[in-house]
């Protein structure tokens, strides 16, 4: 799906389009409620940790999934990451596959978890699946990005949320990527007073090759502006930026056009690690900006995780 997020989805932005689409949003949420009631939930023999979001795309879910995978390995566990197979999410699948030894993907998350159990892994980490009611989760972790938070606060298509903010009651941990936001924390605590709130930030794996260069940056991810901001925060010179839809299937001529534009302006191309895997498939080896996530109060975070996987 080629998704450009409309302006009226943005934080503190509300207009006639949101109002027009509101009845559709209400209908979708009613259908989701019916779905939740009629679906049978399956409990598995090993703990299931779900890393999800309610804001559609760009919340740092996959980097957090990989960080938790490494945390569990350091606890002498044998975790596995499970991701539902979507053809258009080849980028995320390849990224995880290259960083996690135990990775399982299937059209059915339940079947993927069964495969995990058959391979002697002792914990499942679900990358996405917060809205999948067919699986009993032992620990639910919700991701937010401090720059977008909940956008205009409405559900799809009136806003960017998969479900309302009240759905945080289902989760035990919230991780906000970015700067501290006490107003948002207080808002969350009013809904779920016992929720554990943590903050994280991206840590780049910087190459010396990036120093003193000027770049044309492009991205086909959930919130591309966050990527460009991160590049600038780490003092990379971005002269031109280009945005593509999330999980975009690039065409060869589009990348050739970007290369020509970069050469014309004496710039180097740079993109995200996710985009790198899509471009590699086309035979392009473009500079990419690898990141990992760093969790503040990590010891406390690990202690809570440990309490749910006994």
Image (cartoon, rainbow, N blue to C red):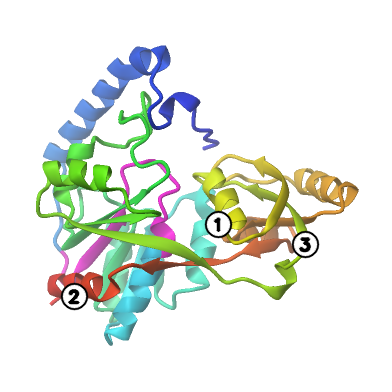
Question: Circle 3 — which element?
Answer: loop
CA distance for labels 1 and 2: 32 Å
Let me know if residue 267 is in the magenta part: no
Within 10 Å of disc 2 (Cα), the crowding (few <14, some 14-19, many 20+) is: few
CA gap, disc 1 and disc 3: 26 Å
Q: Earlier in the sequence, mark 2 or mark 3?
A: 3
Do tag 1 and tag 2 residues touch (Cβ < 8 Å)?
no
Closer to the observer: label 1 or label 2?
2
Q: Residue at x 30, y 31 (%)?
A: 153
Q: Which mark is residue 303?
A: 2
Identify the residue under disc 1: 91
Magenta part of the chain: 44-63
Task: Please give the residue where the numbered disc 3 appears in the rendered image.
Answer: 213
Identify the residue shown where x is 15% and y is 47%. 189
The tag earlier along the polypeptide, 1 or 3, is 1
Q: Which mark is residue 288?
A: none
Cβ atoms under marks 1 and 3 closer than 8 Å = no
Is residue 245 something that shows in the picture? yes
Q: Nearer the viewer, mark 2 or mark 3?
A: 3
């Amino acid at each position: 799906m080629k998704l450009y997020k409309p302006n009226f989805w943005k934080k503190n932005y509300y207009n006639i389009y949101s109002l027009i689409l509101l009845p559709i949003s209400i209908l979708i949420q009613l259908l989701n409620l019916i779905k939740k009631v009629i679906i049978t939930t399956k409990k598995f023999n090993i703990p299931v940790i779900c890393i999800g979001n309610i804001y559609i795309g760009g919340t740092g879910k996959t980097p957090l999934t990989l960080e938790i995978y490494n945390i569990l390995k350091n606890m002498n566990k044998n975790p596995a990451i499970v991701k539902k197979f979507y053809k258009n999410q080849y980028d995320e699948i390849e990224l995880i596959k290259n960083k996690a030894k135990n990775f399982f993907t299937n059209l059915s998350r339940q079947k993927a978890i069964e495969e995990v159990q058959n391979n002697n892994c002792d914990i499942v980490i679900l990358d996405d699946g917060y809205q999948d009611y067919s699986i009993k989760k032992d620990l639910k972790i919700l991701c937010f990005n401090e720059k977008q938070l909940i956008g205009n606060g409405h559900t799809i298509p009136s806003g960017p949320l998969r479900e309302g903010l009240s759905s945080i009651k289902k989760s035990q941990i919230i991780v906000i990527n970015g700067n501290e936001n006490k107003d948002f924390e207080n808002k969350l605590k009013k809904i779920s007073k016992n929720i554990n709130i943590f903050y994280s930030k991206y840590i780049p794996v910087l190459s010396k090759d990036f120093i003193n260069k000027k770049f044309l940056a492009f991205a086909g991810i959930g919130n591309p502006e966050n990527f460009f901001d991160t590049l600038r925060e780490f003092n990379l010179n971005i002269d031109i930026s280009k945005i593509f839809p999330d999980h975009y299937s690039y065409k060869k001529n589009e990348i050739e056009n970007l290369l020509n534009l970069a050469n014309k302006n004496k710039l180097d191309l740079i993109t995200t690690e996710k985009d790198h895997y899509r471009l590699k498939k086309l035979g392009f080896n473009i500079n990419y900006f690898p990141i990992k996530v760093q969790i503040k109060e990590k010891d406390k975070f690990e202690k809570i995780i440990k309490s749910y996987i006994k």
